[in-house]
Image (tube, grey):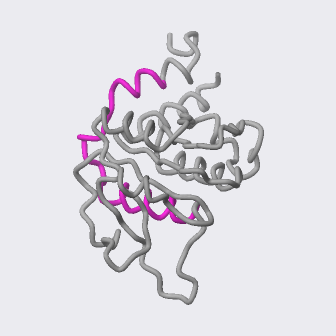
Amino acid sequence: MTEERRAKVESLIEKRQGGLTVIVEDVTNPHNIAAIIRSCDAFGVQSIQVVDSSGKWTDFLRVGRDSSSSANRWVDVIYHESIDACAETLHAEGYEIIATVLSEKTENIFEADLSGQIVAILIGNEHSGASERAKKLADRALMVPMRGMIQSLNVSVCAAICLFEIVRQRGNDERFVDLNLREKLTERFIPKEATR
């Protein structure tokens, strides 16, 4: 590993956000998930939770390679067989699950305080959004306000906007520095001979 490459990887590790993940529920287009993985990497999010109740697991290292721009090598993809299993795991880890739902009763993401908690943003599928079960399991619901005739966004665009707003609100808050995550990523991405 060259010094330049090592410096780039160390910078990536230092900028990773603790306590932030994305849940994608039964998203059918692997290119959408790959684009979300790319956004996760761009905003320093280390993992994405993929709920696939159909059981037809997709290899995101192979499918969607162009959409992710190889970000799938830097972001952990964690699979769940159901939204219940995913929610149980994340709630046990202390995550607040926030569903993205377009409704007048839903809080506007740009008016919500997202700066103080560990968050899992739940993105529903391309056709019907978050399932009713997912909405019930969520702790909170947010929406990205629309001004046009079309009242929805592509799932990957919605995820990117949500991640941007959370990261913007967090700023450089030291509460989200995860030293254990940094250590694990250093072991994983920097060869031992490069750390001497």
> Is 155 or 44 nearer to us in this picture?
155
Q: Is residue 179 magenta?
A: yes
- Give the magenta range: 156-185
Q: Quadrant of residue 169?
A: bottom left
Pick the residue in front: 85 or 2: 85
* Rendered residue at 61%/31% (across/down): 5
Magenta residues: mostly which secondary structure?
A: helix
Residue 8 visible? The answer is: no
| Residue 132 locus on image (x, y percent) | 44, 59
- The residue at the point 65 percent across, 37 percent down is 55
The x and y percentages for residue 25 are: 54, 51
Asked if residue 10 is among those painted magenta in the image, a careful observer would answer: no
Say whether residue 23 is left or right of residue 63: left
Residue 35, how many percent across, how many down?
A: 64, 54
Q: From the viewer's side, name the closer residue of 18 and 5.
A: 18
Total marks in image: 0
Q: Is residue 137 above or below residue 132?
A: above
Is the residue 27 above or below the residue 129 in the image?
A: above
Specify the quadrant that holds the N terminus: top right
Picture quadrant where residue 178 is located: top left
The answer, for residue 145, to whether it is visible in the render is yes
Identity of the residue drawn at 47% across and 81% down: 146
Residue at 57% of width from left, 36% of height from top? 77
Query: 58 or 135, which lies in front?
Result: 135
